[in-house]
Amino acid sequence: LILYYNNYNMAVFMIIGKNEPLYEMTLTSSQTPGDMLTELAYLHQFILHSSLDMVHSVMWSNNSTFLKVVDRFNSLIVSAFVTPGGTIMLLLHAGKSEDSVRAFFTDA
């Protein structure tokens, strides 16, 4: 569940309601410089918001709440979880362990 930018670890978690983002959190190591987070914040938001189209197309053809990988951007992966009420949880990460992503969403 980690993004690697110049050896810094980070992942981005976002909760989206019916029409608007409700919550966003960048998960980083304590060694990640603050200016790097500021520079990447817009890119992360763009990647996550652009993946919403894929989430909407997959959620109607899949009976599961965990949609797995819904989008990719270079080496970054967007995984999604949709609640029965329609709230969407997105995780932008570089890891490929589906089990740890599923565990993250079920604990969130």
Image (tube, rainbow, N blue to C red):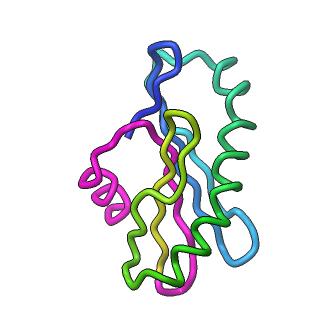
- Which quadrant is the C terminus positioned in? bottom left
Instruction: Please state the extent of the stretch shown in magenta in the rendering.
Output: 84-108
> What is the count of numbered marks?
0
Q: Nearer the viewer, residue 38 or 54?
A: 54
* Residue pictured at 59% horizontal, 15% vertical: 33
Q: Position of residue 88 (x, y in %)?
A: 56, 70
Q: Position of residue 78 (x, y in %)?
A: 51, 51
Q: Nearer the viewer, residue 31 or 70?
A: 70
| Quadrant of the rendered image containing residue 14 | bottom right
| Quadrant of the rendered image containing residue 44 | top right
**Furthest-left residue in this view:** 99
Relative height, residue 43 to residue 77 (above, below)? above
Instruction: Tell whether position 89 is magenta.
Output: yes
Instruction: Tell whether position 100 is magenta.
Output: yes
* Residue pictured at 58% horizontal, 41% vertical: 73
* Residue pictured at 59% horizontal, 75% vertical: 57
* Residue pictured at 47% horizontal, 86% vertical: 84
- Which quadrant is the N terminus positioned in? top left
Q: Position of residue 91 (x, y in %)?
A: 49, 51
Q: Position of residue 93 (x, y in %)?
A: 46, 41
